[in-house]
Image: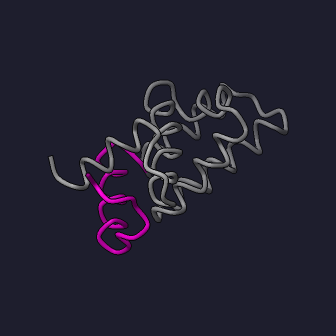
Amino acid sequence: MSDPDTIWNRAAEGTGGEEGDDALAALLVLHGMVMNGGLVNAIEVAEEEELHAAVEGYRFFGLDDAADLIVETQSALDNDADPEILETMKDGEFYDLVPDDETVYDAFAAKLRDEPSAFAAAD
């Protein structure tokens, strides 16, 4: 298994301890929710801390447009927007930005290449 795969798997388990590990772990929690139930559903079921950490994780990996969309959608839900209408609009927008795990993995691999010290060493 390569170092990136080891670090990715470690983050998926919620371990690692460095800034990059924590950012990836937080991003992966919400990303999994989005891929399984859509953006609106993920925002509705995630804890506030999880959402905040995930947004920071998306930003850490340069996925700022996805982070902005999460914040925008959360704000709309907080202001009593109809979740079904939001689903129709926002889920598709999110999938255009982050269509699959590979998009996240590529952003992670680029960050690991550029800032390896942001991640705990792969053992």
- The picture places residue 7, in percent across and down from the top left corner, at 32, 50
State the residue lying farthest toward the right.
79
Q: What stretch is highlighted in magenta?
A: 98-123
In this view, 113 is above or below 119: below
- The picture places residue 62, in percent across and down from the top left corner, at 47, 65
Q: Residue at x 36, y 43 (%)?
A: 10
- The picture places residue 76, in percent across and down from the top left corner, at 76, 42
Left or right, 5 with respect to 1, comes to right
Q: Which residue is drawn at 30% across and 61% down?
A: 109
Q: Residue at x 26, y 47 (%)?
A: 6
Q: Is residue 3 in the magenta section? A: no
- The picture places residue 22, in percent across and down from the top left corner, at 51, 51
State the residue lying farthest toward the left.
1
Q: Is residue 115 in the magenta section? A: yes
User: Which secondary structure dominates the residues rendered in magenta?
Assistant: helix
* Residue nearest the observer in this picture, 82 or 21: 21
Left or right, 118 with respect to 113, comes to right
